[in-house]
Image: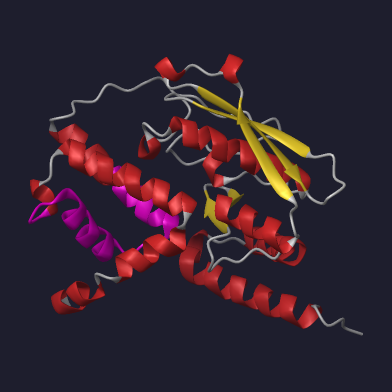
Amino acid sequence: MRTNGEPKVDDLVRRNTCAARVQWGDRLRSKDLASLRAYTREFGFSVNSGDVLLLGSGWYVTHGGLVRLARRRHCAGIQVSPVKHLSNPTSSHWAFKATVFTGPHCKGFSGFGDANPSNTSDLVRGAEMRVAETRAVNRALRKAYGIGICSVEEIGSSSPPGPCEGDGTQRKRPPRQVDGNGKNGKHLLRDRLCQLIRQHQLDPILVKSYAVEYCGVKALKDASREQVEGFIIHVADWAAKDKNALVCQLNSYLREKEGAA
């Protein structure tokens, strides 16, 4: 006999399966679908809400997915504080400790997160402190609710990720020197913006319209490298904090998109 909750879970499994096939197509393997069904039943993750992403060879949970899970499980609170002796603002190296309380009598589940220019994506350059805080919260939430897959925000490189071990080991990369005014710099910015659009499933035409207004230019090609880089950091930060608000902002440019069609 089915319980009252089972039909709803089964519907979510079907929706997630359909959405995953549409979004990832040939990249989706049978074992990926099996894992997605398991995560759906156990944690209630939603593909359409951006709770999980298929990157490289496996699934990754997002910060938004973890926060929504905590809300569904009636999380009692999250305490976050910097670890001062492990942080160095001068070199943009930050470390945070987060503790999740699953209930009023819970002693807490703690996790640490660090970020610096060698283990973060170019998308969030200059925002290492916020990345470190998010990583700490993600690790604490994963511990609190028994989630064995890594979070997107814990990935230490913009290249396709590999397995994320339970100890939080992240791949580090040497700093790259890029000519900020040359073609390589512009191509790098374009790649970063494209990755941001793919990661958060944003409409590229609406993002371009927003970028033009944000940079105060007639065409995006007229914007300076510094303006575009500032826009990328702004959108990456907004998407991580409140993707729904960002989408509402982008949707305000729908008329322009329809006029161009």
Can residue 186 be seen in the rendering of this structure? no
Q: Is residue 102 above or below residue 30?
A: above
Q: Left or right: 151 with respect to 44?
A: left
Give the image location of residue 57, x and y in percent: 57, 48
Give the image location of residue 123, x and y in percent: 37, 40
Among the 4 quarters of the image, the one containing residue 226: top left
Quick one: 195 or 92, which is closer to the camera? 92
Q: Left or right: 158 with respect to 70?
A: left
The question of residue 75 being in magenta is answered with no
Give the image location of residue 257, x and y in percent: 21, 73
Q: Left or right: 64 with respect to 121?
A: right
The question of residue 218 being in magenta is answered with yes
Residue interval drawn in magenta: 191-219
Most extreme residue toward the front, as rendered? Answer: 104
Quick one: 244 or 6, which is closer to the camera? 244
Q: Is residue 207 above or below residue 158?
A: below
